[in-house]
Image (cartoon, rainbow, N blue to C red):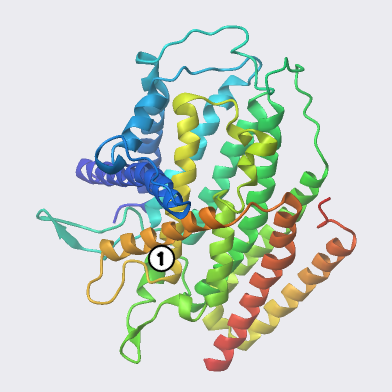
Amino acid sequence: MTAGDIVEYVVKSAIIIVFLLTAFAYMTLYERKLVGRVQVRHGPNRVGPGGLLQPVADGVKLLFKQAITPRGVDFPLYILAPAISVVAALVTFAVIPVGPGGVNLFGYRTDLWLADLDVGVLFVLAMSSLGVYGIVLAGYASNSKYSLLGGLRASAQLISYELSLGLSLVGVLMLTGSLSLNDIVNGQGGTWLGFIPRWYILVQPLAFIIYAISGVAETNRAPFDLVEAEQELVGGYHTEYTGLRFALFFMAEYINMVTISALAATLFLGGWRGPFFGGPWWLLLKIALLLTGYVLLRATLPRLRYDQLMHFGWRVLLPLSLLNIVITAIGIVLLG
Amino acid sequence: MVDNYAIILIMILTVLGFGALLLSIGVLVRPYKPTPRKLQSYESGVPNIEPLKGRYTPRFYVIAILFVIFDIEAIFLFPWAVAFDQLGLFGLVEMVLFIVILLIGYAYAWRRGALEWV
């Protein structure tokens, strides 16, 4: 690896980080605006034209907040937890291809992905498991019963839905025969009958539904946001965090939403492939649509009870994802 | 060809540097005026009981054990899925047997109330 390579990858990493942070900032604004519209009000519209500078104002405010470290916290773990969360959230994006390989950018030939791992799907699952550590450690180290209960609930919820999330991907892997996300996107090139794109959602609809539900649960979003059920748990695992430390958890949650959407687009919706023109714009469009789905879910559905959540994950989604695998296997054997 | 894992390592280091920057940059600008009350952990406005006793329901342990069992199953399914087009009918029968054995264990756990959450 030459120095030039290292510079290239650092620059690419920085681009991904900046993109995800911008997405995070404007996702918060978009969510507040859209939820406002659903509830027949305007949402934030004072800072900047139409409220466009609201995320900047929020960030500056959080920057100037006192960093309170309560008595009795386990400080190394307490400070490590938000860092783990945000690292796991950001690094997952490294394996998602945003466009074709070998593109000329400013006279420099490069691939529109950071890393093409042979085990890309496993890497994504591993990173999302690492994110659980951030939440558990935050709950454990905070020396607060709300944090502890929130952290435990979060980890139980995440590991329960991670099973169906992982198993729902098996059908796609069987169709592709590869764990590399690039191969999965390339497997969805071309069309049926000349106009229907060969996206896996059309042959794996059940897997997509299971993935979407588990994805919402994995990111702790409504209607699965029991982790932050403020009526019973105050703030959940980040009760004792203030200022930018709290912002890191918030950031991890929103970046995870972007990543789960990007992964859904890559695995089921053809990734950066699309009619008329392929490339990053298609991926962005699909991510934006899926994120809109997230916001509308939050605006319309009430929160589940915790026993309903666990029952749904273990008794409905898990058997369904196993059933999907068997159906897919039989289908592939019968149809060749 | 550059090793892809080295690229991931570069990304992790970049992100770590960025995270450390975010966690430390506020020291320069934010005020810090702690009072004993302010440093208490949150307890709805009343004095809280310290130290915290970390006792919670054993359900969480059961869920963790079930997760390990089914996660290992998922790990077995991944290589099978990738090689499925070469295995054909044989692979299908093998895996259906594997899943059926697992489902027996799943039914047992269900019967014994491991999936109940009340």
Residue A303 visible: yes
**Residue drawn at x 89%, y 64% as measured from the top left:** B111
Give the vertical position of A75 relative to A260 (above or below): above
Residue A163 in which image quadrant? bottom right
Give the vertical position of A148 relative to A107 (above or below): above
**Residue drawn at x 49%, y 78% as measured from the top left:** A175
Measured as percent of width and height from the top left, residue B30 is found at 39, 15
**Residue drawn at x 67%, y 66% as measured from the top left:** A317
Measured as percent of width and height from the top left, residue A131 is found at 54, 43
Disc 1 sits on a residue from what chain?
Answer: A
Task: Between residue A101 and residue A238, name the one nearer to us.
Answer: A238
Measured as percent of width and height from the top left, residue A150 is found at 66, 37
Q: How many marks are shown on the rendered structure?
A: 1
Task: Between residue A142 and residue A297, name the one nearer to us.
Answer: A297
Task: Between residue B23 and residue A174, name the one nearer to us.
Answer: B23
Q: Tell me if A253 is positioned left or right of A326 in this view.
A: left
Mark 1 falls on what kind of element? helix
Give the vertical position of A75 relative to A102 (above or below): above
Measured as percent of width and height from the top left, residue A2 is found at 23, 44
Residue type, mark 1 in image: Thr
Residue matched to label 1: A266
Q: Residue furthest right?
A: B112
Residue B91 visible: no
